[in-house]
Every structure is written in structure tokens, then in C-alpha cells.
């Protein structure tokens, strides 16, 4: 009886497997697949696409296909794109006013997405923070970077440095698109390629894989985040993350021997102190020079 039961179970399993791999019709020799609807983004060559008030020449098939690639990649980069949509409200609340103050086109806020996905990440080359600033660049523009303080992780200060950087590039190249390319690959390298290739436009340049994709990636991120529902991301505003703007500022010009004790004095945890002040890199803040720091204390 037991052997007979085993045979029946084996037969049922084999039959199920055969049914699973049976084609739906004689013209379809593949697997049985349930019908699904997929959004496949395309680029309309008759439409205008813009970055920083400069037109993207999608009438050029090469540019159009490169942009289409970035639309598809960012549409099906699900977890990261969903999180970027959710975080954009929080970060753009800080970034947008600073860009406006410096006269930088608002589209450059998407650089923070392309560079870091709004994370205080560290690249293999040592670039760090939302704006992925190198240590030397940060120090050249007046940021403090050491074992205890890394102002590349201070969103407001790093955004200001990024703005100054971009303004310098725009003055050099006379194009915001080229300024964005220089932000990615460096001004010296971009100047050499423009000269070698006899080109005036970013879209006519043959560059590294990363920089060839960079501007089109910014454009794709812009359109996905501007209209996420069009790309299949149904996220309501109340589901996005609000700005971290409910805090008081404490000015400190002496050494803090233990930031955990410092936080508890104000009724908050060390974890919350770090969330609001990620530029504090250690458990202590030495301050022999009497420099004045502004530390955010969440309410």
C-alpha cells in the first residue's frame, strides 16, 4: 500500500511538471506564462526633453537610444527608485533653495540621486556624501574633513560646495550640460576630450561608459521622479519621507568628550543626534581651536 501511494504521488508530480512546461498553443513552444502588463518606456523623437534648460537632441538616434536605456534602467531598478521617490521630498527641501540661491538650474538636484541615491556613501575612489565630493575638493572649498568631522556629510554645506563647483564649470564651458559632465569626469579630462574630438556638445562626444551615460541618466531620473505614476510607481505624497526640519541648533565652541552624554543632556539618543548630524564622525568632538560648531538637536 505504501509503495502504491508513493507511485501515485510521483505520477501527480510528473504530471504537474509536464503541464507547467506545456505550450499554450502550437505556435508557442515556450513555457506557460500568465499574462502581465509591463511598462516599457520609450523616447518620442518628436517631443522635447530638457536638462537645465538645455534641449536633449533626441532626434539623434544615438542620443534617443541612450536616453531610452536610462528610462528602462530606472523604471526597473525598483527598490532604489522607490526609495529615491520616497526620499526626494526630504532632500529636495534642503537642496532646492540652495541651488536657487546660487543661480544653479533646479535640474541639478537630480545629481544627488545619480551620485549617491541620497546616501552618505563612500566610493572606491574616496568620494563621500550625497554629492560624492573628494577630500581634496572639499578642503579646497573650505570644508573640514578629518577623523572627527567630515563636512562632506553635512547636506547644506556639501550642497553649497557642489554649487560653487558647478558654477566654476559653467564659467569654463559655457554649458550646464558640459558642467554636469565635468562634475562627473573632471574639468581637465573633459577639456582634453573636447579638443581631441573637435566637439562642442556633450552629445557629440565619445567618453567613458560612465560619463556617456551620466547626463542621460540625470534626464531619466528627472522625468521618473517628476511623474512616477507614468512609470508605474504609485506612491502618494503622504507615503514619502518628510523633511527633517523640526530641530533646534546648539552652538558649541568647546570639546565634547562624549557625544552620547551630550545627546542625553537634550533628551535625545546618540542615534538621533547622528541622523541629524551625520558629519560628526566619532563619539567625541575635540576642539582645541575653539571653532564654533552648529549641532542640530531634534525636537
Image (spheres, helix red, strand yellow):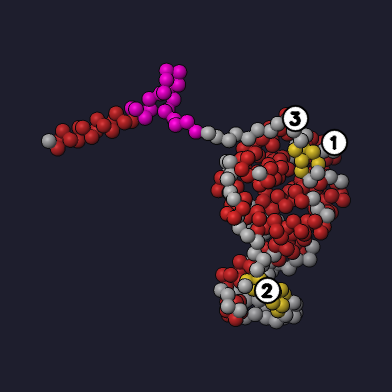
> To which residue does mark 2 refer?
248
CA neighbours of label 2 inside 10 A, class few (<14), some (14 to 19), many (20+)? few
Our reading of the magenta stretch's main secondary structure is loop
Q: Residue at x 65, y 61 (%)?
A: 243
Is label 3 in contact with label 2 (beta carbons under 8 Å)?
no
Secondary structure beneath label 1: loop
Where is residue 21 drawn, in percent x and y? Answer: 38, 27
In front of the other: 157 or 298 = 298
In front of the other: 196 or 243 = 243
Where is residue 262 drawn, in percent x and y? Answer: 61, 79
Label 2 or label 1, whichever lies nearer to me, is 2
| Residue 182 seen anywhere in this rendered image of the structure | no
> Which numbered disc, 2 or 1, marks the residue that appears first in the sequence?
1
Secondary structure beneath label 3: loop
Magenta residues span 18-36
CA neighbours of label 1 inside 10 A, class few (<14), some (14 to 19), many (20+)? few
Amino acid at each position: 500500500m505504501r509503495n502504491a501511494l508513493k507511485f501515485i504521488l510521483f505520477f501527480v508530480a510528473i504530471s504537474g511538471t509536464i503541464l507547467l512546461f506545456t505550450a499554450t498553443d502550437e505556435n508557442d513552444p515556450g513555457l506557460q506564462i500568465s499574462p502581465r502588463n509591463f511598462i516599457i518606456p520609450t523616447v518620442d523623437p518628436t517631443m522635447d526633453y530638457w536638462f537645465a534648460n538645455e534641449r536633449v537632441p533626441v532626434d539623434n538616434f544615438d542620443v534617443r537610444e541612450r536616453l531610452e536605456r536610462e528610462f528602462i534602467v530606472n523604471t526597473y531598478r525598483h527598490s532604489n527608485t522607490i526609495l529615491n521617490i520616497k526620499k526626494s521630498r526630504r532632500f529636495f527641501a534642503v537642496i532646492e533653495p540652495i541651488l536657487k540661491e546660487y543661480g544653479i538650474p533646479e535640474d541639478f538636484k537630480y545629481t544627488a540621486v545619480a551620485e549617491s541615491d541620497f546616501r552618505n556613501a563612500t566610493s572606491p575612489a574616496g568620494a563621500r556624501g550625497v554629492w560624492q565630493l573628494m577630500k581634496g575638493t572639499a578642503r579646497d572649498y573650505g570644508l573640514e574633513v578629518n577623523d572627527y568631522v567630515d563636512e562632506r556629510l553635512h547636506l547644506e554645506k556639501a550642497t553649497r560646495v557642489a554649487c560653487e563647483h558647478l558654477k566654476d564649470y559653467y564659467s569654463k564651458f559655457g554649458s550646464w550640460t558640459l558642467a554636469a559632465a565635468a562634475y562627473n569626469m573632471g574639468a581637465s579630462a573633459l577639456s582634453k576630450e573636447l579638443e581631441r574630438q573637435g566637439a562642442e556638445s556633450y552629445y557629440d562626444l565619445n567618453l567613458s561608459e560612465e560619463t556617456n551615460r551620466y547626463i542621460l541618466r540625470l534626464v531619466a531620473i528627472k522625468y521618473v521622479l517628476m511623474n512616477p505614476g507614468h512609470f508605474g510607481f504609485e506612491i502618494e505624497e503622504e507615503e514619502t519621507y518628510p523633511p527633517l526640519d523640526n530641530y533646534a541648533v546648539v552652538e558649541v565652541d568647546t570639546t565634547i568628550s562624549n557625544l552620547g552624554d551630550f545627546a542625553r543632556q537634550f533628551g535625545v539618543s546618540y542615534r538621533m543626534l547622528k541622523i541629524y548630524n551625520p558629519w560628526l564622525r566619532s563619539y567625541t568632538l575635540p576642539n582645541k581651536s575653539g571653532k564654533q560648531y552648529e549641532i542640530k538637536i531634534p525636537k
